[in-house]
Amino acid sequence: MADVTIESILQENRSFKPDAAFVETAQINSLAAYEELYSKAQADPQTFWAELATQELDWFQHWDQVLDWQPPFAKWFVNGKINISYNCLDRHLTTWRKNKAALIWEGEPGDSRTLTYAQLYREVCQFANVLKQLGVKKGDLVGVYMPMIPEAAIAMLACARIGAAHSVVFGGFSAEALRDRLIDAQAKLVITADGGWRKDAIVPLKEQVDKALANQAVPSVENVLVVKRTQQDIAMEPGRDHWWHELQKTASADCPAEPMDSEDMLFVLYTSGSTGKPKGVVHTTGGYNLYTHVTTKWVFDLQDTDVYWCTADVGWITGHSYIVYGPLSNGATTLMYEGAPRASNPGCFWDVIEKYGVTIFYTAPTAIRAFIKMGEHLPKARNLSSLRLLGTVGEPINPEAWMWYYRVIGGDRCPIVDTWWQTETGGHMITSLPGAIPMKPGSATRPFPGILADIVDLEGNPVPANQGGYLVVRHPWPGMMRTVYGDAERFRRTYWEHIPPKDGQYLYFAGDGARKDEDGYFWVMGRVDDVISVSGHRLGTMEIESALVSHPAVAEAAVVGKPDALKGEEIVAFITLDSEAKASETLAKELKQHVVSEIGALARPGEIRFSDALPKTRSGKIMRRLLRSLASGEEVSGDTSTLEDRSVLDKLRQGN
Ligand code: WTA
């Protein structure tokens, strides 16, 4: 076998069948049905996707060719004409869904709004005309830097409607991060708000925009549109800055959707990459619309009565694909919540579920671990019986966190879809279909139909079952990123060259280590960059961390390697404790022993460091790169702009 792969050391044998009541109404309701779909798609991916594109979407003009694949550049539905805003709005207006709630919004202070499909359509058309009035044209790019308010979705849909690409920058990013992204994308206009509510405080978004644009730093930006949300005084620069509500009031609601080429750019979304300059991930129109539509429909087993809630921010791919485009294209009711669990209301998520009768709840492992730490009494105090399906995304979920989610939030009745995917993939890639695929806690289960995922070594040879290796995808899929904005070479280098083409076939390299078990289930073991090398054994982070999290005192764990003369690397574990537990030498010893008994002596951490919090990205991923520097006593270098809370690093340096 070529080169070293990654060793798998943790076994998880629990398995759960979906609840019979769930299966009864599920769209895809047996393993055999999934396998039939999968085989059909595998045998002829192009026909599979073309049939779905015909059935599920409205096209202004049919395509000439399903796929044009000039590796690594793909074009889907060549010469097809489509508009995703049309598919999300207009086509529902001629059905009973016209007056169905499209968007239910809850603000952090407790204010709320519901927009039906007809109302959302009207707002989007008016705002599209506002953009036009300010000179935005097809092919332009618009920056969006917004709180979690309906106007964020309206802005995205309005851009799509007139054929302007959007670049949404997460509202928690700094002025500098915003400026770099606006410059890279050459944004013509920026849409923002005076502020947004987060944890009982105002995030001063407009102020950040002013800083980003100061001294003509982004010459391409001609206008700034500002939503009035938090009402505090802000500076408005005459000529450049405009109030959303003033222009919206007089704008016409007549704005037909622009027929877009299937391969026209829909949006750029910057993703940090582990070091260096953020990459502008480019997604185009037709393939992305199809892929987010179909994954939303099948993975969430969407029914017309569902109240679907994804807790991500619209500034992340999860918000793009699974708050806005996927659900609306399906005519679903999508819920958007501005707030976050906070001292004044740690149980706010459970309030929202109870208030709106949420049926599908989609969140991240980092949130689940935080819920566990806050205690069961919070969800127990609310009626969560409306829930029928749970989902998770963003990191591997530790089996113990999965069990808690299943039992406490799902009442042992709701299937969990553990969805593995990336900004780059546009939508879910490896995930259970909830009525069809039995679940194994900690596994994202099986590839979505049409996704030819595999585990290979560095030369592209498939590795045997239960052997860790590199997660790859063998065939292009409609939702895949098309390039890195302005840097096709970087696209090729990052995703297509680590593993050379094998027998003429290009393999998409995801950068994750994983194994496939004897049932074909995928187990993601963590980022390849984070692999730890102990005495010649290459270990992924997920399994050791899961062993630690299975100890009752541990809320969260992150392991990294520290150079060691003898072993190559020694494992250093950073631990946050459950609210009841106390850090001590004895506990550190016990945790080391716990890992030995769960996994084996090989994975025994040499050092345990207790900490109140772990450094995370703003979307909740643990930044092991920073912990690695800390563990080996080096200066923390590289990009730290995506770090959520900088004080965490200082505290870790001081050893608490
Ligand atoms: C990780 C988020 C295990 C993985 C949609 C991937 C996961 C990266 C899972 C992409 C999951 C995401 N199980 N790992 N269910 N979901 N990841 O671009 O390392 O923010 O490569 O997209 O998150 O993160 P991104």
Image (spheres, rainbow, N blue to C red):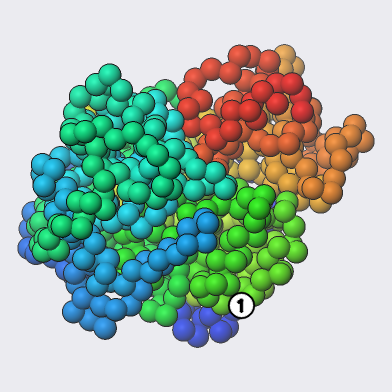
Q: Which residue is painted at 18% across and 64% down in the image?
A: 86
**In the depicted view, which residue is nearer to us: 236 or 83?**
236
Which amino acid type is shown beneath numbered disc 1?
Ser
Q: Which residue is painted at 48% across and 23% down in the image?
A: 639
**In the depicted view, which residue is nearer to us: 279 or 386?**
386
Going by the image, does 551 lie left or right of 278? right
Q: Is residue 413 above or below residue 490?
A: below
Q: Position of residue 510 (x, y in %)?
A: 42, 41
Ligand 1 is within 8 Å of the C-beta of the residue at disc 1: no
Quarter of the C terminus within the rendering: top right
Q: Which residue is painted at 52% across and 55% down in the image?
A: 108
Q: Position of residue 197 (x, y in %)?
A: 49, 48
Residue 201 appears anywhere in the view = yes
Q: Position of residue 541 (x, y in %)?
A: 63, 38
Instruction: Sort mark 1 into few (<14), some (14-19) or many (20+) by Cα contacts within 10 Å.
Output: some
Q: What residue would you read off at disc 1?
A: 385
Q: Is residue 628 above or below residue 267?
A: above
- Name the image quarter holding residue 615: top right
Q: Which residue is painted at 70% across and 40% down in the image?
A: 557
- Label 1 SS: loop
Q: Position of residue 366 (x, y in %)?
A: 60, 48
